[in-house]
Image: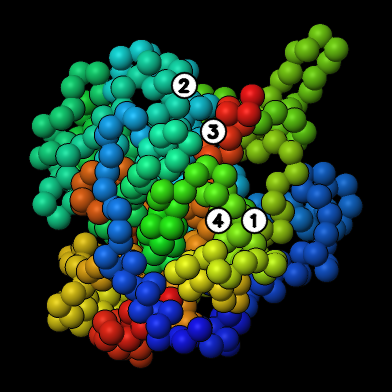
Amino acid sequence: MNREDFPMLEQDIIYLDNGATTLKPKSVIDKTVEYYEKYSANAHRGDYDISYKVDQEYENTRSLVKDYIHAKYLEEIIFTSGATESLNLIVRGFFTNLLEAGDEVLITQSEHAANVIPWFHLANTNGICVNYIPLDDNHYVTLENLKKVITPKTKVISLAHITNVIGDIRPVKEIAEFAHQNNIFVVIDAAQSIGHIPTDVQDLDVDFLTFSAHKMCGPTGVGVLYGKKELLEHVEPLILGGGMNESFDNEHEVYFKDLPTRLEAGTPNIAGVIAFSEAIKYINSIGLDKISEYEKKLRKYLVDKLIDIPYIDLINIESDSGIVAFNVAGIFSQDIAYYLNKYNICVRAGNHCAKILKNEVGVNNTLRVSVYFYNTYEEMDMLVELLSDRDKILKEML
Amino acid sequence: MDENLRREIILDHYQNPKNRETVTDEKYIKVNSNNESCIDNINIYILVEDGILKDIKFDGEACAISTSSTSIMIKNLIGKTIDDAIKYINNFEAMVDEKEYDEALLKEGIVYNEIYKQNNRKNCALLPYKGIKNVLNGLKNQKNA
Ligand SMILES: Cc1ncc(COP(=O)(O)O)c(C=O)c1O
């Protein structure tokens, strides 16, 4: 649906790498240009009209994000450069100070590097332990498995809402309820879910939530850190400089501003944040329920066909998102991606930054197809047709 | 070169690579080669005795071009002196980089003589050469020191 809104789709390509980034509708691109052409001033310095306009637009996006994830307060929305920075900010600006040696953080083996490496770093520097919640046969997280592994030392559970290789939707609400009964913080990496299923941080009752704009039709270089206000108050800024300080004097005494500005030092990605507003409006205009329904149908259509190809090994037959991971027996995933590229089909080959997942699913590398609402049944047919002829693949992949 | 023959040789070395074996023997020097931009990851194990490459094995995961290129490289390097091996490698790299090279030295390595046309696959063909060249240059300098 809505293909005509995407200038990239005027090209002859089949874009199936939406897990990496999504295409941008014209309205987002236009809004970026509008900022540079009509009111290209700095933010938070509003002494003249166009600068005031920048502030208004910038804060308008914050307000749209707040509503989009149903946060309680505007100050709970911090703009960052992306999900990766958001995760680093809470691990290094909050949990570093809070956790003590021996405290445990639970993640899983299907997390993205952005939700693994900052914790590993903390383990190396502060002596915390990073352990894994065992996954079930479908590689899902279940509340039962979580209950089995928590200990009195467990202080944080940090999980993707939807994982980027398996594509499973985690039972975040149940996990958060159980975690809070046990005084455990819950961090949710919403990078893969934010543009695909509705997110209600109050209903889910998560402590922190992170995502990137570019995976929901928005610009690159913009991300969000959501945190409950009372927790964000204790997040120490990692980046210090202009915009975030109230005053400083020669005695090296610095007084920080309040949230959210305190955590947004320096000139932000103004054009990106402003254009992000259009992405939110765009997704809202279609509706997340409709998007997720469509993706599920499209995915099922594809999986039902791939399953009939004998030499295709599906990693995740079941999944509630638009992600399909598979291998063609005896052929390295990158060779397949290369072959499909000859037909202008964009799919991703590799470990998808989930490098420890191999322990779980037994393969290092996979092909990943990740669909979005602008993908079509015809595109799935084309993909299946190209994958249906192993001799053709072998002949053309070189 | 005939396209079908080229494809046949590459696919044969991809699907049935020679000398693919994990080595634990500590007499072998191990070197890892991986491409930053893709997911190829190959270990090469080299046994050098009296200045001669007595044996070479490899393991790891890589695409058709990298795997076949490794298999062909190893086949052609086994039995060579360090100096001759370096010569072979330089000659191969010259071919891939569209410089002057000696066709006669390359044997099956010649199947990559048009890989320069596919910029994104040049590095695949060169992958195994990177690591082993460092090792051999190191050994050569040791000898000369
Ligand atoms: C599950 C998950 N978390 C985090 C990230 C990191 O997002 P970004 O690179 O935009 O910071 C990604 C991106 O692929 C992801 O899929």
Q: Position of residue B125 (x, y in %)?
A: 50, 62
Ranked by sequence position, the earlier of labels 1 and 2 is 2
Subunit ID for the residue under disc 1: A
Mark 4–mark 2 CB contact (< 8 Å): no
Q: Residue furthest front?
A: B50
Q: Amino acid at mark 2?
A: Thr
Q: Position of residue A248 (x, y in %)?
A: 80, 19
Residue at the disc numbered 2: A96
Residue at the disc numbered 4: B88
Q: Is residue B88 above or below residue A344?
A: above
Q: Amino acid at mark 3?
A: Leu
Label 4: state its secondary structure.
helix
Q: Is mark 4 within 8 Å of ligand 1?
A: no
Task: Sort mark 4 into few (<14), some (14-19) or many (20+) by Cα contacts within 10 Å.
Answer: many
Label 3: state its secondary structure.
helix
Whether residue A9 sits left or right of residue A59 in the image: it is left
